[in-house]
Image (cartoon, rainbow, N blue to C red):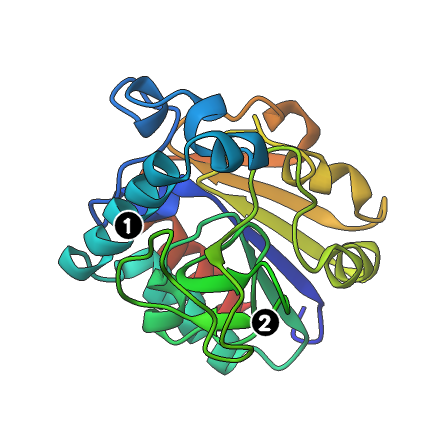
Amino acid sequence: MASARLVILTGAGISAESGLRTFRAADGLWEEHRVEDVATPEAFRRDPELVYRFYNERRRSLASVEPNAAHRALAQLEATWPGELLLVTQNVDDLHDRAGSRNLLHMHGELKKGRCLGCEAILVWETDMDRASRCPVCAQGRVRPHIVWFHEVPLDMDRIYDALERCDLFVAIGTSGHVYPAAGFVQAVPPRARTLELNLEPSLVASAFQEIRQGPATELVPAFVRDLLET
């Protein structure tokens, strides 16, 4: 197992234990905002002030949370694992980054980045953003949140599918199974690959996994990492 190629997918459940609200839980963000109002290109064209405000609030909330034991365990696994490991997250927070993960893809974008609508530069952006925000690269382009909205194509899909098609172990952590293409990743791995879901409760695609472990990510993920490193 030491040379196995790993692909690990994380969703909102892993960051919920750090205090970040999920979108689809009973008290989730989608209970307060319709997807159509804050998470589509059409919403940004129709009411940019609302969209900017929504993501400014999400960005500010990062200052009050820290990586938890699950984030840290995955960073430890990456630092220790002798084979290939790719961590793919649906989360737009920076908790994996702060925990130390480096071979990391944010397929849905990042709260602390902006994207120029003119020259398409990707910019580090840690402060509030509004209609007056301009790109420092081209000095004139308007900046939008670097977030993949509904009806947009997630980032780095070629690299993700390449890793999935070659992997020996695919693990999904804290994912709901609502959002594609991530919900379909388990179907993209080779038949020989081991598949494992770690979740507080089974996802909508749990039946596609060979093994399911239920419980808090802060307990399941460190235990999984310990087991993997000892085999």
Q: Is residue 199 visible?
A: yes
Give the amino acid at mark 1: Asn
Give the CA distance from mark 1 to mark 2: 20 Å
How packed mark 1 is, by other alpha carbons closer than 10 Å (few <14, some 14-19, many 20 or more), is some
Whole-percent x, y for residue 39 in the image: 48, 34
User: Residue at 85% across / 44% down in the picture?
Assistant: 191
User: Residue at 21% across / 61% down in the picture?
Assistant: 66
Q: On the rendered structure, is 195 left or right of 108?
A: right
User: As rendered, which of 79 and 65 lies closer to the eye?
Assistant: 65
Q: Residue under label 1, please give it.
A: 56
- Quadrant (top left, top right, bottom left, bottom right) of the N terminus: bottom right
Whole-percent x, y for residue 77 in the image: 47, 71
In which quarter of the view is residue 4 placed?
Answer: bottom right
User: As rendered, which of 156 and 83 lies closer to the eye?
Assistant: 156
Give the amino acid at mark 2: Ala
User: As rendered, which of 231 and 70 lies closer to the eye?
Assistant: 70
How packed mark 2 is, by other alpha carbons closer than 10 Å (few <14, some 14-19, many 20 or more), is some
User: Residue at 14% across / 56% down in the picture?
Assistant: 64
Q: Residue under label 2, please give it.
A: 121
- Element under disc 1: helix
